[in-house]
Image (cartoon, rainbow, N blue to C red):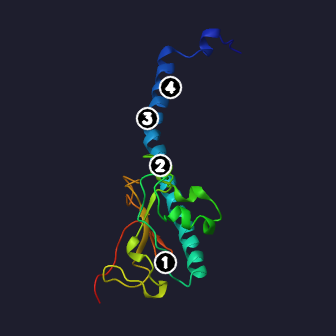
Amino acid sequence: MKRLRRSDLAFTLTEILVVIGIVALLAALSVPLLQAVRERARASGCIGNLRQIGGALHLYLADNHNVFPTLLTAREQRTDPGPVIDEVLLEYASGVEDVFGCPADTLGRYQSSGTSYVWNHLLNGQHAARLQFLGTSGATRIPVLADKENFHPGHDSEVNILHADGHVAKELTFDVGP
């Protein structure tokens, strides 16, 4: 049996450098993938928030004879007066205030104004069964809420939109006219 010397068990400098190079290459390749996964998760969280707000809106409608609330489109600061979505629908959203903030809102819109979303003020006071928006009727095509900014760049869509029927889409499409 051949006896191994201590030098036979050690790695050479070249082998160590090759391993370090491979690990660095794999790390460099995985960083963009991890960022894309993180952004996709934020976009999914935003979609979930909009669905919850849609559920809260439908509870509000049930309590208010199916008439949409009269709200401001948005506000700049939390201290600005006027009825806004995060105040009116908070009790219907099980008191979960964070539902009004998009996880991808790195611009701080949620922190400063109370919500990352804008309300379609053209729906103010309309009856849910007779909604009209720019010549369009039918809840599947009428937007209710949308992201305030392009919070989701580089994805299928930069803005998520809640429609009157409660579904969330990544694009705005509606038929104009009869």
> Label 2 sits on what residue type?
Ser
First along the sequence among labels 4 and 3: 4
Residue at image coords 54%, 73%: 57
Residue 25 locus on image (x, y percent)? 44, 32
Which residue is under mark 1?
Answer: 68
Which residue is under mark 3?
Answer: 28
Image depth: mark 3 or mark 1 in front: 1
Residue 169 locus on image (x, y percent)? 43, 69
Which residue is under mark 4?
Answer: 19
Per the model, the C-alpha gap separating discs 4 and 2 is 48 Å
Q: Quadrant of residue 142?
A: bottom left
> Label 1 sits on what residue type?
Phe
Is mark 3 in CB contact (under 8 Å) with mark 2? Answer: no
Q: Residue furthest bottom?
A: 178
As helix, strand or loop, the secondary structure at mark 1 comes to loop
Label 2: how many Cα within 10 Å (few below 14, some 14–19, many 20+): some
Residue at image coords 50%, 59%: 46
Which residue is under mark 2?
Answer: 112
Depth order, front residue of 65/109:
65
> Label 3 sits on what residue type?
Ala
Label 4: how many Cα within 10 Å (few below 14, some 14–19, many 20+): few
Residue 68 locus on image (x, y percent)? 49, 78
Locate the N terminus and report the quarter of the image it occupies: top right
Per the model, the C-alpha gap separating discs 2 and 1 is 25 Å
As helix, strand or loop, the secondary structure at mark 2 comes to helix
Residue at image coords 64%, 61%: 95
First along the sequence among labels 2 and 1: 1
Residue 9 locus on image (x, y percent)? 62, 15
Is mark 2 in CB contact (under 8 Å) with mark 1? Answer: no
Per the model, the C-alpha gap separating discs 4 and 3 is 14 Å
